[in-house]
Image: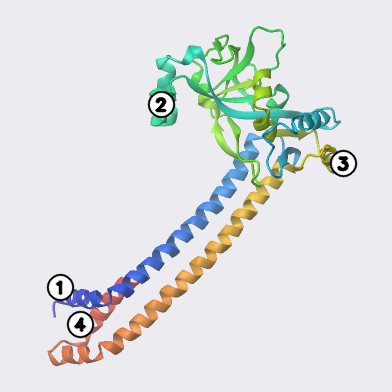
Amino acid sequence: MKLINVIIMSLKFMYVRKRRIILSFTFSIIALYVTIQINVTMGFNNVLGESITKVLSKDPDLTYSIEYKEGFPEDGSLNEESRELASYIANMEGVDSHGYFTVTTDRFKELKNNNEYYQIMKELYGNSQSEDFRGISSVVYVEPTAINICKVEVYEGTADITYDEESETIPLLAGYSLKDILPIGTIITEDSSGIKYKVAGILKKNSNWLEVGDASFSYTFSLGNNLDGMMVAPINPIFFENLFEDIAQTYYFNLEDDSHTDKIINEIQDKADSLGLNASIYSVSEKINRMNSEKNSYNKLRILIMIFSTFIIILLLATSFISYLVKHKSEFGILYANGIDTNNVVQMVIMENSFMI
């Protein structure tokens, strides 16, 4: 019997069993998808932890943040208490860099109709930079005392963004991709407030900053802000007052060393409790570990789904194969009676069931 005839007969038998084949195929896809998700998640956790560690200026065990358990109230009822806690931390012995930061977008008058700037944004961010977004810039606004939370290194100029409140301009760091448009000494004006910024430094290529997340979740950051097309500037007083409820959720500080870690953290926690702040102090290491723990919990569920799907697939294959042999026993007899030898029958059985596998 020719192979083509064997294939045709196999397909006919498969058509009769199409429901079982579709079911097996569906569970196979589920098992494959879950396996891929587990591998991707585990790989992402490792990369994220390593990447954040490289971005921070100090060890993750020495970098801390304040986390408000139920989010920071938007009515301003705890603004003074939060600032008092920040001032308390800033004056403690053993605390190094400290302060608030936020990542947002802003408009600068000089960049509104700058075609060169627009083209750079399109190259960096693809077609997301439409005509409606001309002149919009992504900016990390950070307190000068917190600039060293991350490794901020400059290609040219200085990374120092401290300034005198009497000064006419505020220092600004431009991303590496903006070095030709915003060379050192360039002054740009914030659109709504009229505050003037003067470029003091150009950041090194592929510099990064932490991305702010929702503080009500157990992890509040990720590595999402490549600074090549962004700017870094001090939080100006107007911005600080008007948007403090958002900024309050991103207070970070570094410890100089680990010699008195427990004592310092306990004192800060006691101060937060005495001020009535529903807040906890966590190190970046603890955040990463918690994030990994949550991801691993999801992975355990995925593994159970994968095992269940695999079991169903094996069960379907086994029962299908057995029922196939039983149901088609008489057909095999007819095939033998018509001169088809055992090898052809075996080929047909193998071919049909191989599609199931």
Q: What residue type is labelled 1?
A: Ile
- Distance CA(mark 4)–CA(mark 1): 11 Å
Name the N-terminal-most of marks 1 and 3. Answer: 1
The kind of residue tagged 3 is Lys
Residue 268 versus residue 87 in the image, above or below: below
Secondary element at tag 3: helix
Decide: is 325 above or below 261. below
Between tags 1 and 3, which lies in front? 3
Cβ atoms at labels 1 and 2 below 8 Å apart: no
Residue 344 marker? 4
Under circle 2, the secondary element is helix
Asked if disc 4 and disc 2 are in contact, CB closer than 8 Å, the reply is no
Residue 122: mark in rendering? 2
Instruction: Name the residue at 68% across, 41% down.
Output: 71
Q: Is residue 1 left or right of residue 324?
A: left
Could you tell me if the residues under marks 3 and 4 are in contact, i.e. CB atoms within 8 Å? no
Residue linked to disc 3: 263
Q: Earlier in the sequence, mark 4 or mark 2?
A: 2
Residue 250 figure quarter: top right
Quadrant position of residue 268: top right
Give the residue at x 61% y 17%: 172
| Residue 208 position within the rendered picture, expressed as x and y whole percent measured from the top left | 58, 31
* Residue 164: x %, y % from top left: 72, 11
Q: Distance between the residues labelled 3 and 4?
A: 81 Å
**Location of mark 1 (residue):** 4
